[in-house]
Amino acid sequence: MTLELDVAQRTRTTAAIIEALQGACPDSICELRGSLAAGTADAYSDIDLRWTVGDADFHGACRKVGQMLEGIGEVASLRADRDSATHPTYRLMFARLTALPLFWRIDLEIISRDHDPEAIQPQRKPGSWSATNSALMCAVAAIKAFLRRDPEAGAHLVSKGFERIHIPVPAVSPRRQVLVLAETIYDADDAYAPLAAQVRQLYREAFGGHEFDG
């Protein structure tokens, strides 16, 4: 099986997300950011968005993101970035839709109009962030880097993935390490085995019969 990415699907989904979020908060603005906004996106680029909402709507918007996305498609995963999970005026949310390739994660910034970068954050709850999930997302990002012919970035990302789960980086080629990382998690963590299997499949689709090269 080869890797097939329908960029038009990403465009349609992005438009649907923007419409849904702005519809949920009529005075809000949802806009592209990152490479999509700059016009430099390639087939592997994430869906990067910024949603600016009224001060009184901020916390409700953060709570209801999952519900809004469910109106577009089944949500496979939704989590907050651990560095902003309790910020009173800013949140970075990561979402994956089941129907979209792993490459096309939704990275959604939610910002209150009175955003204060220096605001004090309450302490986040233990267990609100998964190192295993983060490691697998590093693997996806590494695959993306290798496809973009940036082996240095790929090696750094997969190394960071092993660091997340406190396992030494194996003495194989950096690209091969991606597959080892996915298989290690598949064998060790039942909760994340399905996602690890998806990462492994993505790897094989990306590199075909050359999965052990590089």
Image (cartoon, rainbow, N blue to C red):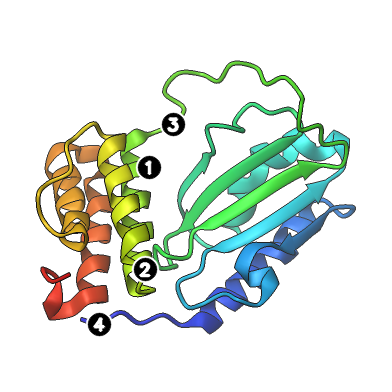
Q: Horizontally, is 96 left or right of 35 in the view? A: left
Circle 4: residue type: Thr
Name the residue: 58% across, 45% down.
93
Please tell me which of labels 2 and 1 falls first in the chain: 1
Gap between marks 3 and 2, in whole Å?
28 Å
Q: Quadrant of residue 149?
A: bottom left
Name the residue: 39% across, 73% down.
148
Tell me the element at label 2.
Answer: loop
Please tell me which of labels 3 and 4 falls first in the chain: 4
Tell me the element at label 3.
Answer: loop
Circle 3: residue type: Trp
Q: Is 22 rendered above or below residue 6?
A: above
Q: Is 118 rendered above or below residue 168?
A: above
Q: What residue did someone put label 3 on? A: 129
**How packed is label 4: few (under 14 Cα within 10 Å), some, or many (20 or more)?**
few
Q: What residue did someone put label 4 on? A: 2
Circle 2: residue type: Asp
Q: What residue did someone put label 2 on? A: 150
Please tell me which of labels 3 and 2 falls first in the chain: 3
Tell me the element at label 4.
Answer: loop
Q: What residue did someone put label 1 on? A: 134
Mark 3 vs mark 2, foreground winner is 2
Horizontal and vertical percent for residue 129? 44, 31
Gap between marks 2 and 1, in whole Å?
21 Å
191, 7: nearer the viewer: 7
Horizontal and vertical percent for residue 82? 52, 32
**How packed is label 1: few (under 14 Cα within 10 Å), some, or many (20 or more)?**
some
* Contact between labelled residues 3 and 1, with CB atoms less than 8 Å apart: yes
Name the residue: 25% across, 82% down.
2
Mark 2 vs mark 4, foreground winner is 2
